[in-house]
Each structure stands twice: as structure tokens, then as C-alpha cells.
Image: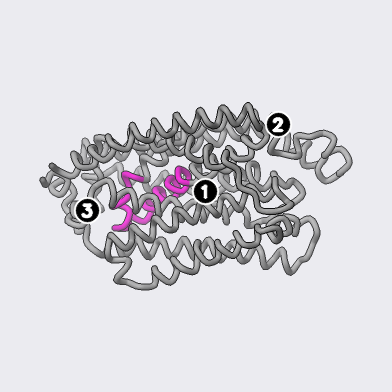
Amino acid sequence: MNVIQAMNAHLDRLRPVALAVGALATIACIAGVIVNQEQFFHSYLFAFLFWLGLAMGSLGIEMIHHLTGGVWGFVIRRVLEAASMTLPLLGLLFLPIFFGMHANFLWTHPDVVAPVPELRHKTEFFLNVPWFIGRAVFYFLVWSGMAWLLRRWSLQQDKTGDPAITQHFQHACGPGLVIFFLTMSIAAVDWIMSLEPRWYSTTFGLVVISGQGLAALAFAILSAISLTGHKALSDMVKPKAFHDLGNLLLAFMLMWAYLAFTQYLIIWSGNLSDESTWYIHRGHGGWQTIGLALILFHFLLPFVALLFGTLKKNYRSLAIIALYILVAHILDVFYLVLPTFYTRGFHVHWLDVACFVAIGGWWLAGFSWIMRGKSPVPLHDPRLEGVFNAEEAVQRG
């Protein structure tokens, strides 16, 4: 059995399970809408933002790879492409957030906005329903278009071996990254920061983007190792590639920690009421424990592990670290969203789990369908020379 057949076998087992679990969880979510509509919309927003982060982070890392041509990118590029190609599906799954705007966003309540001049100004020029919907449609069109174009060129190069396509990647991904950062930063304001419409932070978009990149990279490493098989991938890839991926994980983690700490330090030193509300809601009633857990589990422990070169060169240990980071990132997104709705103290509802599993089931099914049947590594990119013989390695039994 060659690498493609082995990967297809894994995907064929994953897809029906993901569909079944997603369908069952969706039924539970429908029941949740009937029982507690407001809670459903809160939980759905948290779940959606986590899975969106995997797709968006994958798109950003894919463009970084095309610009730099690093060895690490050839190991995970197919996973990044498949994950980013789920963006049209996520655009469809965004519809419940439209219907739940009144439940989630205070600025949709005229009685809340009217007494506050600052909010009235924001809703006139930015935070209003038509602009919110229009921006969301624009985001998904642009993101899906970029993901589709990169995927199309990549598969075309596999078939034709045209080296000019590599130049297309490099010419497109510079402006593409600028568009990515601008649109995702504004989307973070729309979908997360505006949950507390009087609060603002100039670094918040970058905090969200760095977290997405960290989670997407962890997912790509774990998927590439799991789907192709440990031995098959280790035969194809030199240990240096795993070491580079571990270093990149460490870099994204440091960037996330630096930006999150800088945001906190600036707001704490300013001590302004409007800027402090976000941290006040997360500083009592048990939410502070989640913040401390993020410092420990989302940064400190994996940071120490990734300092050891031997752990980064070994695909098994790197996969374990990646899984650990991915699970910790769920807590990060939970901390970003839900304290806004539960200012009295820590709160977990069964719909948080149901919505997470429902969206995750459909997303993983879509990911596995896109991933199936394609080579796990690009075949004819001219930058592959000296990395590994991709075509020979893929066909090897």
C-alpha cells in the first residue's frame, strides 16, 4: 500500500464517523434551540470561531510558505490547502450567527445604544446590521477565492510540472497576506470585540490571528503525521523538516504570548474604564482560573517542551505537542467569547459541547473529502529539489 492509498484509507474511515457525529450533535443543537435559544447562539459563536480559526490560520500559513519556500511547508501544504478550502462551508455555517445577532451583540439593541453617544456613533458608521452582513459576505468571498486559487494552482502544478506556477504563488501571496491580515483583523472586531461594543484594543486582531496560526499549524502537523502514517512520512521527510515545524510552532506561540501580554500591559497601565471592562469580566468568578490555565497550558508547558531539539526532530513527540496545543486553543477561544455573556462567573453549558461537535463533524467531513485522492505532498514544485523525491516517495509501497 503506497502513501496515497494509506491516507485515503484513513480519510475513508474518518469521513463517515465525522458525518454521523456531526449529524447527531446537530440534532442536539436543534433541541437546544427549542429549549434555550439564547444559549444556543452564544455556544454556536464560540464553536464557529474555533473551526473558522483552523481554516483561516491554514490559509495564512499556506501563503507564508509560498513566499518563503521553506522545507517545513512541503510536509503540511496539502493539509493547509484542504483546511482552507473549507471556507465556503464555513460561510454557509455562518448563517446561524446572522439569525442570532440580537442574542449575541448588544449594539443591535436600540435601547442599549440610544443613551450612549459613543455607541450611537459606532452604529451609524460601522456596527449596524447591513454593514455587518455585507462585510461578512465580503470576507468569505475574498477568503474562499484566495483558497480556491492557491489550491487550483497547486494541483495544476502537480499535473503539468510548470515551474512558472511557483512564481504565480509568490506574486499573489504578498498582497494576499496583506488582504488576509486586514480582513481577519476587522472580522475579529466584528465577531468578537463588538460583543463588548465599548471595549477596544488596537492589538486584538493580531492576538486572534496569531492564535489561529498556532492552532492551524498544530492541526496541520498532527494531520500530516496521522493521515500519511508515521513511518511513511518519516521515510519521505528528513528530521530537519520536523525540527523546522517545531521551531515554527514555537515562533507562533511566542508571538501569541507577546501580543496577548502587550495588550494586557497597555490596558492595565492605562487603567481606563472602557478599556478595562474586557479584563474585569475575565478576572473574577472563576474566569481568572481559565486565564491562568492559558498561561500554563497554552504557553508555558509547550514552550518548555519545544526548547528541546530532540522532541522537535521526533515526529511522535511533535505530534503529541501539536495535539496538546490544539486542545489548549479550544480553551483560548472559549475564554475570548463566553465571559462576555456570563459576567457573574464561570459557566459551561452542554450546548457549548454540542455546537462544537456539530460544526466540527461537518468541518472534518468536508476536510477529509477535499483531502482524499491527492498526493500528501506537492509533486513538481521546483523548490522541492534537495528536500525529498516527492513523486518517488509517494509511489513507494
Q: Quadrant of the C terminus?
A: top left
Q: Residues within 10 Å of mark 1 (few under 14, many from 20)?
A: few
Choose mark 1 or mark 3, whichever is in front.
3
- Provide the residue designation for mark 1: 178
> Magenta span has 59?
yes
Question: Marks 1 and 2, how far apart in space?
Answer: 26 Å
Magenta-highlighted stretch: main secondary structure?
Answer: helix
Q: Quadrant of the N terminus?
A: top left
The part of the chain drawn in magenta is 54-79
Image point 28% across, 60% down: which residue? 316
Tell whether 271 sits left or right of 387. right
Q: Earlier in the sequence, mark 1 or mark 3?
A: 1
Image point 16% across, 52% down: which residue? 389
Name the amino acid type tagged 3: Leu
Task: Return the residue nearer the eye: 141 or 67.
Answer: 141
Q: Is residue 92 visible?
A: no
- Provide the residue designation for mark 2: 129
Question: Marks 3 and 2, how far apart in space?
Answer: 48 Å
Tell whether 315 sits left or right of 275. left
Choose mark 1 or mark 2, whichever is in front.
2
Q: Which mark is residue 233?
A: 3
Q: Position of residue 161 (x, y in %)?
A: 21, 41
Q: Position of residue 395 (x, y in %)?
A: 13, 43
Q: Is residue 207 above or below residue 9?
A: below
